[in-house]
Image (cartoon, grey):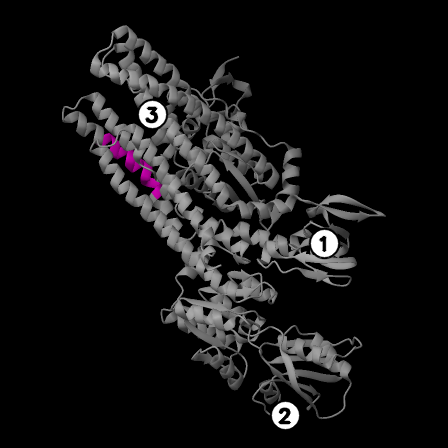
Amino acid sequence: MSKEKCSHCQLSFEKDALIDDEFGNKFCCNGCKQVFYLLKNEGLDDFYKKLGKNTLNPASNLKEISDETARSIYKNYVKQNSDGFNEIYIIIEGIHCAACIWLNQKVLFNAKGVIEAEINASTNKAKIVWDESEINLAEIFNIIQSIGYNPYPYDPVRSQTRSDAKRRDFYARLLVGIFATMNIMWIAVALYSGYFSGMDESIKDVLHFAEFVLATPVLFYTGNVFLKGAITAVKTKMPNMDLLIFSGATLTYIYSLYAMFSRSGEVYFDSVCMIITFVFIGKYLEVISQKKAVDSLDALSNLVIKEIQVKNGDKFELKSANSVKIGDVILVNSGEMVLIDGKIISGDGSFDYASLSGESIPVFKQNGDEISSGAICLDGRVEYMAQCDFQSSILSKIINLLENASFKKPQIEKTVNKISGYFSLIILSLALLTFLAWFGLDFGFEKALIVAVSVIIVACPCALGLATPVATLVGLSTGLKKGIIYKETKIIESMAKCDTIVFDKTGTLTKAKLKVVNSEFYTKFDMNLLANLLKSSNHPVSVAVFEHINHDYKSLNLSEFENIQAKGVSAKFSNTHLRGGSYKFMQELGLKCPNSDMTSYFFAIDDEVVAKFELEDILRDEAKDVVLNLANQGFEIYILSGDNEKVVKKIANELNITNFVANSLPSSKAEFVQNLSKNGKNVIMVGDGINDSVALSVATVGISFGSGASVSVDKSDVILVNENLTKLYEAILISKATLKTIKQNLALSILYNIIAIPLAMLGFIIPLFAALFMSLSSISVVLNSLKIKNIFKGNR
């Protein structure tokens, strides 16, 4: 039977075994077919011209996902987002620089059905969102594999295991490099001495061969990491750092082989050895430093896979957090963390919320108390009933927010990534021009080559690529430790540029718990009516009045309940109309009632106001210090409140704030913030109520407390887990420190390249020092980013 070649791998197969397509192309397997169309769609089909008569390993060697594995991945790692699309977090092995990230994102974005593909440069962690009706996960994995990278689902435990294995592998390769480098240096000393004092050719040949023996494993074993990256760069036509390093070292190695066998010129095996080893040391230290930068985020993600003691009959059994259902009884012992929100049904204990809120003051919890995920039991033992599943718990929501945040790139990072994508190609072009210039000026092939190699190696696209993502990850991590959650890393950049802060009053500048200081009842009525209406609202005024009447009420079936934002509430019981709210609300209803200079709550039955409650705002203990610190930072400060003018003015005077607006409705709050923005202000809006949600969404940065209304938390950009305004000031300090660090990193990497590349082109930097300088530039960027963690140490 006749044989024909596969259109992709060019290997010969029986004609009947090949898969035909409508265009007459033939493939040995679906893997080759997918890669063929991928390259064609990406405009990379020139690859086959360059392949010529060579063959490839069959693309069927790609790791196909079995049905059983696919079901397991979909069950444990794939989630559906609010839009109905599938979502997964994966690790992509083989990413080394910004060019690798660009390539993976470009290929994934061009795949039909992929909605979102974001990759974190520091962790190689990717978030993929896709439409299952157009593409499945196996096809997505095959696309990534086809361009030379290895994807696998992100699992905190598995990720840690792989990370440890990678460090061990790097360590073994590093030992080989260091051993060979130390020994080759002694041989190099002998050769250099012989160069000046004279040396017999036979001894020189032996020493050259010894250097060759030592340099070879360093280049192909220690340098294997760079080799893989270089191969990917060539295949995808996307030059990266690995291509620069390996091509420079290989050119030097090949020339040294020629010099050794021809006995003409000098060998540079010692430079090959040192180039690879020094850069690899830098890469090893970089991996360790980056891990330190994101340890807090990884530690939080590790909680997802912890097991929980769940009651089964009379015994407790270990279950994964994801398998716990509403109503399950969970046991928490001393030293354990609560992973799911619930209500205590037995036992008591002290709990520490420091892992999320940043505050370490223990809170005593007992039977009947609600307990939040993220709390650590310091002492005692409690059994509690789960009130939600893990995905709906506070801890899980925070973890999801942080995971999503690390993929939303700041504008400054997007700009840098565009530059980094072309950086390596520019360097290769400069190296070629340098070689031609030196060779054309009669300095000889050897000198021209060594200078060109120095140019290739000294350039550092890696430092440029790491400048922003590492700093933002450290910023996220530092914020988490302080109980501050940035929903997206780009918010850090936006906040650092803000110059105006607008505060809501009630529950933000003042304590969320108002106090009734005076009450008047105009006629007798059933207190159950008032109590049920108050319990239907979570507004601070309603909560305060309910606590004041201290009524053991009977639950009534209220109907037609309506929340009128910033005004009050209304409902019906049987045929009776119930209304409660502000003086302005009563006036709009046409009901007569006495006005008051204080925050007031009026209760009306049908068309008669039957009670009035006057409440007082109490400033937060830390409010004055925070406002003073913000003013010293140069912020223009406003108070925007729905309360009456006299109450708002009293608070503003206590805080020395001259700009305030009273009687603001939700729409007018949003309009006020928008007008500030139109006038060139970058506005931070701080609020915690439902009536603040619109203003939060239109501000440059919206900030709310984690305990605020869920709508406000959803609309805000930054969440302060702990109800303390000091966290607002700390969030601003972190954002400013992070942006400052990013700018320092970029300045450092750009300045380094501006100085180092011309010096290398002029022949002032030998390959050995080029490798050393390149590694140090990357490490310095990472170490400079880690300084963000220490910004509060001087204030203690």
Residue 647 is labelled as: none
For marks 3 and 1, the one nearer the N-term is 3
Label 2 Cα crowd, 10 Å radius (few <14 / some 14-19 / many 20+): some
- Magenta stretch in the rendered image: 420-433
Residue at point 47%, 51% (across, down): 789
Please state the horizontal and vertical placement of residue 641, each as a whole percent of the image.
52, 78
Whether the residues at callouts 3 and 1 have beta carbons within 8 Å, the answer is no
In the depicted view, which residue is nearer to us: 590 or 593? 593
565 relative to 722, above or below: below
| SS at mark 2 in the image | loop
Please state the horizontal and vertical placement of residue 411, each as a whole percent of the image.
39, 53
Label 1 Cα crowd, 10 Å radius (few <14 / some 14-19 / many 20+): some
Residue 705 colored in magenta in the image? no
Discs 3/1, front: 1
For marks 2 and 3, the one nearer the N-term is 3
In the depicted view, which residue is nearer to us: 220 or 578? 220
Total marks shown come to: 3
Amino acid type, residue under disc 1 in the picture: Asp
127 relative to 510, above or below: above
Left or right placement of residue 123 versus residue 254 in this view: right
Q: In which quarter of the image is residue 134?
A: top right
Residue at point 50%, 61% (across, down): 717
643 relative to 132, above or below: below
Would you name the residue on which mark 2 appears?
A: 593
Discs 2/3, front: 3
In the depicted view, which residue is nearer to us: 632 or 22? 632
Left or right placement of residue 105 versus residue 595 in this view: left
Left or right placement of residue 89 versus residue 700 in this view: right
Residue 379 is labelled as: 1
